[in-house]
Image (cartoon, rainbow, N blue to C red):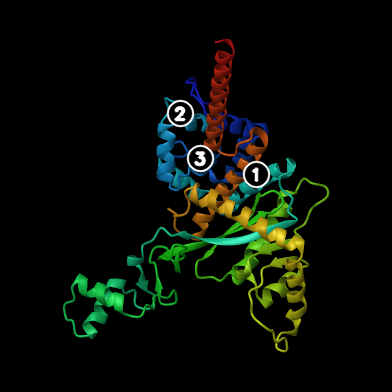
Amino acid sequence: MGGDCGAAKVAGHPFYTRLNALLDAVDFDGFVEGQCARFYAPVMGRPSLAPGRYFRLLLVGYFEGIGSERGIAWRATDSLAVRSFLRLPVDEPSPDHTTISRTRRAIDLETHRGVFTWVQQRLVEAGLLKGKTIAIDATTLEANAAMRSIVRRDTEQSYQEFLTGLAQASGIETPTREDLARLDRKRKKTTSNQDWKHPWDPDAKVAKMKDGRTHLAHKAEHAVDLDTGAMVAVTVQGADQGDTTTIIETAIAAAEQIEDAQAEVQVLQALEEIVTDKGYHSNQTMIDFAAVGLRSYVAEPDRGRRDWSKEPAAQTPVYANRRRIRRARGRRLMRQRGERIERSFAHLYDTGGMRRTHLRGHANILKRLLIHAGGFNLGLLMRHLIGSGTPRGLQDRLVTVIARLISLIGATCRWFFTIFA
């Protein structure tokens, strides 16, 4: 399924050339072809997209900041550096976005997770993933769905039809667009997820974004190793789910990923500590963490004097958590949490191009996020090897070095002419 590049030689970017050398050294293509063999028929239809090339295309999406598969396909068409990374000769057409999409649908979620775990195993080998202390936090992703397309769950009535019914009930027999807009502004908003849904993406939920807009969205939750900054786990949840609800799934996923990443290590380092912000604090969360032997460092909101008569089992873990976060180590972990978590959000969603998703359904979105998170971890490996974790970072670094050399040469020439003039 892999194949050779052909006779035509393609120019490469230094970052992608070094990344391909890293992947070749640990037989990345052999691994993904073995994992994906069951999804490919021996002979049927037109030539398929090889697994190694498919996953590289998704990595290009991360490193180049491209959120859509159509954009990735365009980038593969017009960039010689990307074609070199994909092992795609200049005389061979690049994969169409429909081919990328069809391959994503054919390869299941667990295989994408397996590639993410494989990258984590390389981090463990390099000493860049510890797994003892993790931080958890969440952010919202704008869904590939418009608010104007939502329908009532009970009647399948569209939002415009709903407003029209309200206008007619108020005495406006044939309301205009302006009438509907005026009515919508004046009425008390009750666009709840219990009453409304998107007909083509039921996983998208009505939520308030960080900039204050109300939009259909998904919730992405990260678990990050506080010792190294490596991505431990990523989950996708409904945007209407509270933090105290979703943290359980993410913590379980993180514990499993840490164990799988250390599959070839003799002495395992289990997950011991979880650090989060005050949105995750609740009596039940403290009880759950204590029950499985996890030390929690969860910022506690000011609730005033507590009455423990109704929940006496929560008193001891809540007080223990409070003591830990007030100590010097607890304050240091809280500072590290903000730095590490926000960095992962910035790389995956802002510079990584996934703040607005171009996919529908949590499974499809999670497939992309797992490979983006794998790209983030590969960036840590590359930074360890060459001092830069992205192609743009390496380019900026080279430009800075050249500028400094030019400045040094200029200063030396000025000194020389000053002395010998």
Label 1 element class: helix
Q: CA distance from mark 2 to mark 3?
A: 13 Å
Label 3 element class: helix
Asked if the residues shown at circle 2 and circle 1 are in contact, with their CB atoms under 8 angstroms apart, the answer is no
How far across and how far down the image is residue 413, in percent?
Answer: 55, 16
Q: Earlier in the sequence, mark 2 or mark 1?
A: 2
Quadrant in the picture for residue 415: top right
On residue 60, the disc is: 3
The correct choice, above or below, for 122 with respect to 343 in the image is: above
Foreground pick, 305 / 285: 305
Q: Residue at x 75, y 81 (%)?
A: 313
Amino acid type, label 3: Val
**Disc 2 residue crowd, few under 14, some 14–19, many 20+, Cα 10 Å:** some
Q: CA distance from mark 1 to mark 3?
A: 16 Å
Label 2 element class: helix
How far across and how far down the image is residue 221, in percent?
Answer: 58, 60
Asked if the residues shown at circle 1 and circle 3 are in contact, with their CB atoms under 8 angstroms apart, the answer is no
The correct choice, above or below, for 416 with respect to 129 in the image is: above
Amino acid type, label 2: Leu
Q: Residue at x 50, y 66 (%)?
A: 239
On residue 119, the disc is: 1
- Report the side of 132 relative to 99 (left or right): right
Q: Earlier in the sequence, mark 2 or mark 3?
A: 3
Q: Residue at x 54, y 18 (%)?
A: 414
Amino acid type, label 1: Val
Q: Residue at x 44, y 62 (%)?
A: 211
Q: Is any atom of residue 365 visible in this view?
A: yes
Instruction: Read off the residue under disc 2.
Output: 80
